[in-house]
Image: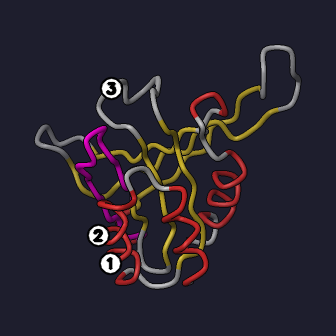
Amino acid sequence: MTETLRLIEAQMYKSEITFSILRDHLQLAGELKAWYRYYRGGNQWAKKFFKEENVFLMSSSIIWCQIAEDGQMRIHSIKPEEFAKIERFYAFESKNSQKLVLSEVTATLRVVDKKGRPELLIFKRPLLEEQGDIAGYEHFMELMEQL
């Protein structure tokens, strides 16, 4: 895992101030099975709230790390036992393509919000123009089948 952690650190936004905290969370969560960068820079969903988001599939949880422009960070940890249902959505790879690709995975959690609705964890397919890691996403989602 040491080599993988070095790779994550080398690619992470503002790693000089954010990585040590993330590393501690990752090490507590067990074995790192897969990870991907959702985006860096502007994102159609997050708008200007975060500069980068990374998602990590660990042996005991999923860790979602959001980093703001100034380096402030939010880390979410979700246990697989919290999943009530997982839905997969497929769309065409491009407007001219007839090939379907996994475009989104929605995990419905067992917990509910203040209005009594189940909370959702949505994994959208990264986009190359947002510096997302498509290969990492596909690998991550293959391993999610094993949860």
Residue placed at 29% from the left, 46% from the top? Answer: 119
**Quadrant in the rendering for residue 26:** bottom left
- Please state the horizontal and vertical placement of residue 135, each as a whole percent of the image: 72, 51
Discs 1, 2 touching: Cβ within 8 Å: yes
The residue furthest top is: 95
Circle 3 crowding by C-alpha within 10 Å: few under 14, some 14–19, many from 20? few
Q: Amino acid at mark 3?
A: Lys
Q: Mark 1 falls on what kind of element? A: helix
Measured Cα–Cα span from mark 1 to mark 2: 5 Å
Residue 118 on image: x %, y %? 28, 46
Determine the secondary structure under disc 3. loop
Q: Is residue 74 magenta?
A: yes
Taking the image as shown, residue 39 lies to the left or right of residue 83, namely: right
Q: Quadrant of the N terminus?
A: bottom right
Say if 100 sits above or below 26 in the image: above
Dot label at residue 21: 2
State which region is magenta.
64-80
* Residue at 87% from the left image edge and 21% from the top image edge: 97
Residue furthest out toward the left? 114
Q: Give neighbour class at mark 1: few <14, some 14-19, many 20+ (Cα, 10 Å).
A: few
- Reading the image, the residue beneath label 1 is 24
> In this image, 76 relative to 27: left or right?
left
Q: Distance between the Cα atoms at labels 1 and 3?
A: 27 Å
The percent position of residue 34, horizontal first and vertical second, equals 60, 67
For label 3, the residue is 48
Do residues under tags 2 and 3 come within 8 Å of each other at their CB atoms?
A: no
Among the two numbered marks 2 and 3 on one chain, the one whose residue lies closer to the N terminus: 2
Q: Nearer the viewer, residue 75 or 116?
A: 75
Q: Identify whether 70 is placed above or below 61.
A: above
Amino acid at pointer 2: Ile
